[in-house]
Image: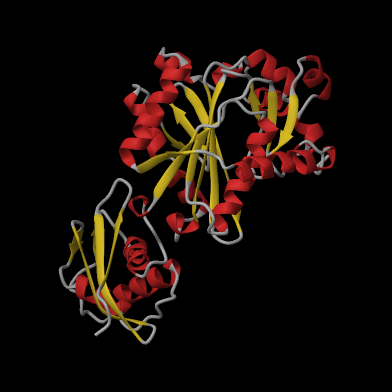
Amino acid sequence: MAELLHGEYKVPGGKLVAVDLHVDEGHLAEVKVSGDFFLDPDEALEVIDEALQGLSATSGVGELAGHIEQALDQARADTRLSRPVTMAGFDARAVAMAVRRALGHATGWGDHTITYLDPGPLDPALHAALDEVLGRELAAGRRGPTFRFWEWENRAVVIGSFQSLRNEVDAEAAERYGVQVVRRISGGGAMFMEAGNCITFSLVVPESLVDGLSYEQSYAFLDEWVLTALAALGVNASYAGLNDIASPAGKIAGAAQKRFVGGAVLHHVTMAYDIDADKMLEVLRIGREKLSDKGTKSANKGVDPVRSQTRLPRAEVMASFLETFRRLYTVVDGSLSDEELARGEELVRTKFANPEWTARVP
């Protein structure tokens, strides 16, 4: 008999789903679903188990969940089930996620050791380059997951990969304030960065960690720890829209992602700590447009800095964030290799400080 495989998936805000199964000639066999969820009627559990029998071990989350839903609907139509099915604390997709984890296609946080990097203050263009270097290193299997905060000294605007340079940045204002412009490899919006005015981190993880999640779901999943960290500082925050973190007082942060061929995900977040809203609105054109749409002249109406909500120095906020990250996940301290740093510096020269890249969307 083939090895018994076991997988678990904890539904965010819901219940734990566990699956035990064998693989027989590439197909699922002897599938048993369990967990602390609520399911009615009881006979529906047997229907779920049977729905998974014989499916290909390479089936994706959507296919697995679809078979479960179809089987439950058919069982109800055939009166095998006496009443409509109620699934509380989980759903068919959660079962599919547990199956994928049992098969080794999907992983959880507990399956990974994350290396914390603290390279000190670097040029924003080098930070952007290191995002690419570390993402490609993980995808190639030469590096594991990494986490790092950005530290920098010079002013910068970091624009999204697909944003129009002239539509986002007022070139005259940027020159007047000595603001460099860097285009990153991830999508999303522009970040106005002065030393000490925001908190930015980059997280590079295997794609298996977000297996089966939509882009929107993956953003929320990878930032669950951020909400926990903010709560520890007394900030009641939640996810808003696709990639924003907000509190009742206003938007706190925005996230962006990049997927690499080979199976790596770059996820980074920038939080407003003590932003100079007036200067930001001089440099960023799009900010003026957004505020005009909302009928307000104050950026603080839309973005509420972390400093005003925590009353703590930036260093203490970051230390608390790192403490939360270490408590929730398996983290070891590490450093950039000389080769990684050299590759990052070469990318700055050939790409991230190159006007052709910066203005690739004029």
Is 261 drawn above or below residue 115 in the view shown? below
Residue 247, horizontal then vertical, whole percent: 43, 26
- Work out which quarter of the rendered image holds the N terminus and state it: bottom left
Is 89 drawn above or below residue 323 in the view shown? below
Depth check: 178 or 65 in front?
178
Say which quarter of the image contains residue 97.
Answer: bottom left
Depth check: 218 or 116 in front?
116
**Left or right: 298 in relation to 325:** right
Name the outermost residue toward the bottom: 25
Depth check: 151 or 280 in front?
151
Say which quarter of the image contains residue 287.
Answer: top right
The tally of labels here is 0
Q: Is residue 248 visible?
A: no
Residue 322, horizontal then vertical, whole percent: 40, 31
**Left or right: 58 in relation to 122:** left
Is 326 drawn above or below residue 151 in the view shown? below
**Left or right: 73 in relation to 60:** left
The residue that appears at 43% across and 72% down in the rendered structure is: 63
Residue 237, horizontal then vertical, whole percent: 40, 30
Say which quarter of the image contains residue 162.
Answer: top right
